[in-house]
Image (cartoon, rainbow, N blue to C red):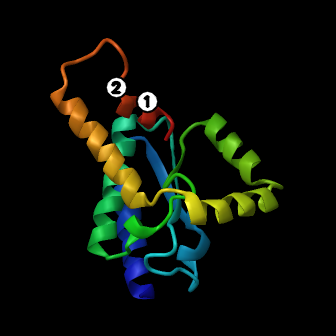
Amino acid sequence: MRNELDKFMREFKERVENLPNVEKVEFFGSITTSAWIRGKSDVDVIVYGDNIPAKVKREIILILRDLNEKYDLKLEKVRCCHPTPFFLDSPLRRQLFREMVSGHKALIELGREWCKESAPTYGEIWAMEDSIKGLEDVLPPLPIPKLSEIFDKFR
């Protein structure tokens, strides 16, 4: 399994780092250790960049989904405890991320425990995003932002 994870991380990093406005990809957490479990563990990854466009962020999500299937990681069964990946593509986002993780380990662990029991799975979130995108593709243009564009702004 470790060999497949290493291949997944290498391919994800290579594909994503070749996209516009992306500077580097960094994995952390259980995926970098022997503690990662197929179908139970999430993927902790940060994509650093400079104002990565929403379209590129969506492409990165699709790369993650594609490689999930290719390497049979079974992420679709895992509860989504945080955005995957974290996009740190501005000074403000980098600062917010540092503040979020700095000195808040107990609170983060409490939140993760709740999410492991109650949060939707990656598969459910991906299906919802696909439904929204599909619906928007057949509706006439509206004079308001698309729901998918609003989601993309929060990535």
In the image, what residue occupies the spot 49% across and 35% down? 51
Whether residue 19 is visible: no
In the image, what residue occupies the spot 37% across and 77% down? 7
In the image, what residue occupies the spot 49% across and 54% down? 85
| Image location (x, y in percent) of residue 61 | 37, 52
Furthest-top residue in view?
Answer: 143
Q: Which residue is mark 1?
A: 150
Residue 118, placed above or below residue 7: above
Classed neighbour count for the residue bearing mark 2: other residues with Cα under 10 Å, few (<14), some (14–19), many (≥20): some
Whether residue 65 is visible: yes
75 and 23: which one is in front? Answer: 75
The secondary structure type at the circle numbered 2 is loop
Q: Say which quarter of the image contains residue 28.
A: bottom right
Residue 18, placed above or below residue 30: above
In the image, what residue occupies the spot 31% across and 76% down? 71
Q: Which kind of residue does numbered mark 1 sit on?
A: Ile
Gap in angstroms between the C-alphas marked 2 and 1 = 7 Å
Using residue 148 as the reference point, say whether residue 139 is left or right of it.
Answer: left
Q: Which residue is mark 2?
A: 146
Q: Which kind of residue does numbered mark 2 sit on?
A: Lys
111 and 38: which one is in front? Answer: 111
Q: If the image is split into quadrants, where does the N terminus sit? A: bottom left
Furthest-right residue in view?
Answer: 103
